[in-house]
Image (cartoon, rainbow, N blue to C red):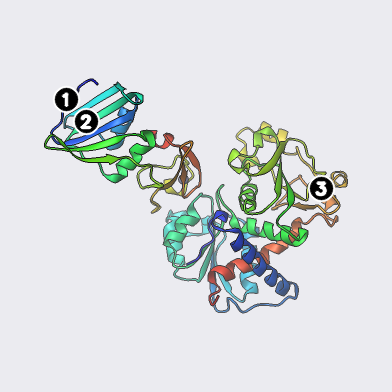
Amino acid sequence: MKHVISIEDFSRKDLDSLLAEADKMLSFVKKGKQLDIMKGKIMGALFFEASTRTRLSFESAMHRLSGSVIGFAEPASTSLAKSETIADTVKTISQYCDVIAMRSPFPGAAKLASEVSRVPIINGGDGSREHPTQTMLDMFTIKKEKGRLDDLHIALVGDLKYGRTVHSLCKAFQNYKKIRFTFISPKELAIPNEYKIGEYRETNKLELEDADVVYMTRIQKERFPDQTEYEKLKNIYRITPETMKTMKKDAIIMHPLPRVGEIDWHCDSDPRAVYFKQAFYGVPTRMAIIKMVAGGGN
Amino acid sequence: MMMVKHIENGTVIDHINAGKALEVLKIIGGPNSSITVIAINVLSTKHGRKDILKMEDVYIDKKKLDLISLIAPNATVDVIKNGKVAEKRQVKLPKEVSGVLKCLNPKCITNKPREPAVTKFIVKQNPLRLICAYCNKEFEGESLLKA
Ligand SMILES: [Zn+2]
């Protein structure tokens, strides 16, 4: 049984073929066509931690494959509130469905779930550790918008210390050639050493002149025990139409969303601002992921 | 070398890194009621100073030998029967350690009460690190043993 637990379980070959499948799905989505791949099948969407957009993106992907969805959107409405373990919840609900997409605040929960589940598990985020489907859709976005996944200069901006999307992206790009990273963050939120892989540069200035991909992240209030520290850093990086003038003509700006103040909405109409497209690409990417683990027949 | 009491049946662990004998003993779960000889900072012909442990009627399983290797990678283990060395064993750094150590990440699923997760750590060398297979957090080799 195949699961999607960690981006590190995927080789370049795996990722490339997954993204090729996502590209096929994209053409169907663009035509507004529904596929029959998951017809008669059910996805369990188990959100032990609320995340409206990840959940709806999974649900949309399942519906586009003609499947249906059961599940819950937050732990308050489940037996977890009555302190059932995650393992027991997963084991039980895996009796009712054909694939599970889950999210929890506990790192390692998805791996544990894969050990007890009757059906494939897709990790939709477990605590600070992993969010592999986000990384896959980020890569799909870069592939579609830049036409390649090798030979790129990627600037990662903001909270590089806690930002798991940033960490997973660094790991995933280990498999690709001629990748150069610029890590842009205040020193309090610097990238941990384990992600400084290959060619990179660190700075606290928003220098984007040379970047092909600018990946913005939100600086999260929850991360700071001291709120004055947060107030000091929250608006440290802000992309405005002025900033965009300094960027390459064919660069792209990405953001896992939701954004707070780090990208001025005046930038949205610039074709280089691809963050909403990125959300759009999430659906075909997750269709490909669902097909890969639960589509049968391939 | 200084002579310490011979044992008739049991285990002798030699070439323990100097000063680590008590930690090794803690891993083994001793001392118990049987005779235990602990020699600390003994002069060794090869490596300067070392510690030695001799334990009457104590035999050590592989899982614990693996753990000992995390703090005393050069240790040698002699199994003594009737006053003679019946078996010589070497500690070996395992690829992974499962079920004995506790993850130090309080949020890790393995620390959530009643979840049926058995801890598992991937062992990385130079320097020695243990990576939790669940939460992926990396720990210094010895920090988990002290917890
Ligand atoms: Zn852990």
Residue B5's disc is 1
Looking at numbered disc 3 in the image, what kind of residue is underneath it? Answer: Asp
| Front one among A296 and A38 | A296
Q: Which amino acid does label 1 sit on?
A: Lys
Q: What residue type is labelled 2?
A: Lys
Quadrant in which residue A261 is drawn: top right
User: Residue B64 at what x, y percent from top left?
Assistant: 30, 41
Q: Is residue B50 positioned above or below A239 on the image? A: above
Residue A289: x %, y % from top left: 60, 66
Residue occupying image coordinates x 29% and y 22%: B40
Disc 2 secondary structure class: strand
Residue hosting label 2? B54
- Labels 2 & 1 near each other (Cβ < 8 A): yes
Q: Same chain, marks 2 and 1? A: yes
* In this rendering, position of residue B53 left or right of residue A93: left
To which chain does the residue with label 3 belong? A
The residues tagged by marks 2 and 1 sit, at their Cα atoms, a distance apart of: 8 Å
Instruction: Give the x, y percent position of residue A94.
Output: 46, 67
Separation of disc 3 and disc 2 at Cα? 70 Å
Hey, which quadrant is residue A28 in on the image?
Answer: bottom right
Residue assigned mark 3: A264
Residue A157 at least partly seen: no
Q: Which chain carries label 2?
A: B
